[in-house]
């Protein structure tokens, strides 16, 4: 799969920038080995919103995607207790993102699908019209990354439990 230079540049800059934001905001006081250990799961959490958008036929620019996530990070830092979750922080981050999208998804859907957006696409300048496919491609790459990470996680968690055939007490 070959990426066009603007998309490759956006990916080269956006994902590492989001990871740096997480690292400085939530891993600053933790042991240095924690961030590399959690990086795979953090990438999974960062790409999950792209799948949510893709399933609803929505697209947004890389800047808007980053803004959505950074706003969630700020809310977690302000209202949450990320230090409490330790090694489970990536799962906590994913759950926070999923909860926000569940509660505010209709608003975001309305924002991204509003009639003005359709008119803007029709009457947009050449520059904007040229950037729309790149924005769509950006989300497609994030969706594919998420799916690849999901396969890895699924395979890892499919280890057979020796007590799998036993019934639980409750």
Image (tube, rainbow, N blue to C red):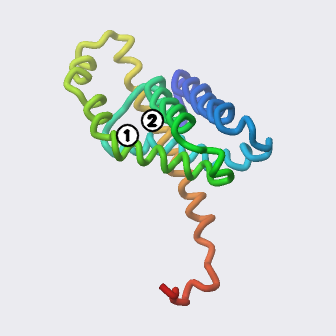
Label whose residue precedes the other's in the sequence (2 or 1): 1
Residue 5 position, x and y percent, is 55, 23
- Tell me the tag on residue 92: none
Residue 17 position, x and y percent, is 62, 28
Who's the residue at 51% across and 38% down the image?
79
Who's the residue at 31% across and 39% down the image?
57
Residue labelled with disc 2:
139
Q: Is residue 97 visible?
A: yes
Q: Residues within 10 Å of mark 1 (few under 14, many from 20)?
A: many
- Please indicate whether residue 117 sits to the left or right of residue 130 in the image: left
Residue 3 position, x and y percent, is 53, 31
Q: Is residue 64 above or below residue 144?
A: above
In the figure, residue 29 lies in which quadrant?
A: top right
Q: Is residue 137 above or below residue 39?
A: above
Labels 2 & 1 near each other (Cβ < 8 A)? yes
Residue labelled with disc 1:
53
- Please indicate whether residue 12 sits to the left or right of residue 104 in the image: right
Give the number of the mark in front: 2 or 1.
1
- Cα distance, mark 2 to mark 1? 8 Å
């Amino acid at each position: 799969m070959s990426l066009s230079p603007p998309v490759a540049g956006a990916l080269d800059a956006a994902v590492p920038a989001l990871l740096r934001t997480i690292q400085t905001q939530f891993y600053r006081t933790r042991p240095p080995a924690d961030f590399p250990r959690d990086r795979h799961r953090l990438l999974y959490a960062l790409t999950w919103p792209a799948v949510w958008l893709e399933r609803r036929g929505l697209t947004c620019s890389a800047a808007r995607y980053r803004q959505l996530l950074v706003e969630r990070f700020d809310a977690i830092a302000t209202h949450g207790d990320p230090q409490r979750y330790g090694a489970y922080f990536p799962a906590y981050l994913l759950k926070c993102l999923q909860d926000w999208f569940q509660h505010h998804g209709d608003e975001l859907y309305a924002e991204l699908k509003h009639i003005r957006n359709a008119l803007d696409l029709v009457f947009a300048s050449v520059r904007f019209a040229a950037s729309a496919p790149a924005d769509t491609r950006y989300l497609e790459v994030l969706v594919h990354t998420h799916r690849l990470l999901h396969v890895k996680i699924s395979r890892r968690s499919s280890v057979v439990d020796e007590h799998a055939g036993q019934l639980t007490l409750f």
